[in-house]
Amino acid sequence: MVIDHLFLSLFLGGSMKFPIEQKFTLTENFIDKYKVIKPDFGFGGLGEFVFLRTYSRLKENGKNESWWETVRRVVEGIYSIQKQHIEDYNLGWNQMKAQKSAQEMYDRIFNFKMLGSGRSLWAMGSPVIMDKGLSASLYNCSFISTEKINENPGAIFSNIMDFLMLGVGVGSDLRGANKIIVKEQKEKENIYIISDDREGWIKSVELLINSFFGGERYSFDYSLIRKEGEPIKTFGGVSGGYKPLEKLHQKIKETLENNINKAITETSIANIINLIGQCVVSGNVRRSAEVLLGEPTEEFLNLKDYKINPDRKEFGWASNNSIFADIGMDFSFVADKTKNMGEPGYIFLENMQKYGRINDTEENWKDKRVMGGNPCLEITLENGELCNLVEIIPSNHLDIEDFKKTIKYAYLFAKTITLLNTHWPETNKVMLRNRRIGLSITGIATFLGNHNISELKEWMESGYNLAKDYDKIYSDWFAIPESIKISTIKPSGTLSLLAGVTPGLHFPQSNYYIRRVRIRKNMPIIDILKNSGYKIEPANEDTLGTVVVEFPVAIGDSIRTLKEVSMWEQLNLAAFCQKYWSDNAVSITVSFNENEGKQIKNALDYYQFKLKGVSFLPNSTNEIYPQMPYEEISKSEYEKAIKEIKPIDFSKMVGIDSENEKYCNNDVCIL
């Protein structure tokens, strides 16, 4: 059956036409009920602020979308894609069933029982997807290997830049080191006029890199690139002008010139990838998220030792760095590095390839072509592969039966996105075969505040098995392959703020804290916050006219904090989730104190058989500096702060200046 489905997809082209013509709409009678309901955003004004600041699009009348409008746009986009696919292949569309299904999905998103990724909240149903077909902007995760760098080195790095500029987090490796010789550039110089778009930027990088490997030499004309401060309309943000790209060209040239007549090194590859990430951020095009994966060589482990590599301090921050950790290796040396520097992290590639969920019965090597993962290592990925994520919030459900109903719609949301092809042929070849998705559970610490671990196990096992059943049913309906993997635990981020829960499986630093958010001081939302009594002050760095807003937050007394949860319990919970829920991977950053840092080697010895990836971070709860993003406060301090502010009234909001805001990447925003 799978072979038949794959043949059908490939034979028919597997490609949806744009613009999408089969429009699906929810009935007005249904929508009218939600227009008068106040959404239960999390953490008081913070959740609604994050929504308006990050995911609400400007309408033609200049006002921002309300939550009911955003959910409508997203759900109608999902079902329009389904309808187009079913009609294109004459598979039998049933409008009545679709309307009922869409209404149920709408209700579950509206009430924060599930959420599409932050990327889909912003883009789904908008012209970016429905008209232009930039489906890659819906994907959270990617992995691009440098292993075949000798075939077309420039294309590898330009693809990484393309992914990042579309907001996709990129995992990459250093497998290409020592596989190709860097050459002198040719004497004759051509001129390349860089167009004012994503394609022009990435093409210039490809041409420059290939000029050191036998390609033509170019000088670059930047005159068409829009000026600094002008809007980037398709994805939001403002242009940083041509300077970030010019600097990238200069730095790449310096890096490769240092390698002339030698095999390209791990450091050179890492430099180029990190420099691209720095450029994407500096150009205000997108926040970049990168992870570099490498063998535990001295060169790789020293990439972030800025005493040894001081020149990398300017851009080395652009990636997290993790090693390919072999099962059974001696962790002593690398564990000491992690204890002292917080890096490297660890990826257990054999476990990624060998297992879905890690238990005694599922060693199947079904994912044997996996080569790495995304920046937070919650998704196992082949070279060039993408994955889209959906979050499920168990603590916002009445009971397990309610939770199981959400599984269906979370699955449908994610699977529908796989019906869209990208503009990368090599990526499509992998994704048409794998149809990988990531149903993620978030707010696990919140759930455990009111439930026991046995209940969590029951919810996870029954939910996973149900999702697998739905994958059989709906893959048949769509006439596409079943998904190679379907579940994950992602770190979450701003989406957990919308829903009012803890992020992923992580425990909070404290039960009560001040959350500080940075925004431009000329944004209309500032006046609304001032009128409600929120404390607002200029940012210390104040280089762009930035202010800091303080939000008092209460997590709840029933939820345990990192002061009460040891490094070992955090690892145990990650292994628990890897066993009972996630067949991709579990994203876990383990917080450790000074004494626990000495035990990281022992922890890796035990958990190398139970996890697919893990990173560690020193617990910095005692660190205090001005305008910290999070500052612990007491319950009495929280109650006093709450009394000094009034509920925020966004109803008259004319609209946030979305052309002056940066967009989310992997649900982590520059605020």
Image (spheres, rainbow, N blue to C red):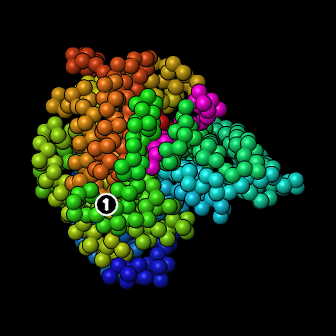
Q: Considering depth in this image, is 191 or 491 the residue closer to the camera? A: 491
Instruction: Please provide the residue range marked out in magenta.
Output: 306-324
Instruction: Spot the residue most to the right.
Output: 188
Tell me where residue 649 appears, x and y as whole percent.
Answer: 33, 32
In the image, taking residue 612 as reference, residue 395 lies left or right, namely left
Marker count (numbered): 1
Tell me where residue 560 appears, x and y as whole percent.
Answer: 20, 31
Q: Which residue is mark 1?
A: 355
Give the position of the N terminus as an image quadrant.
bottom left
- Residue 24 in which image quadrant: bottom left
Residue located at (47% from left, 68% from top): 430
SS for tag 1?
A: loop
Q: Amino acid at mark 1?
A: Tyr
Q: Is residue 139 above or below residue 509?
A: below
Let me know if residue 316 is in the magenta part: yes
Tell me where residue 404 appears, x and y as whole percent.
Answer: 17, 58
- Residue count near mark 1 (Cα–Cα under 10 Å), binned few <14, some 14–19, many ≥20: many
In the image, taking residue 525 as reference, residue 460 lies left or right, namely left
Q: Is residue 438 above or below residue 435?
A: above
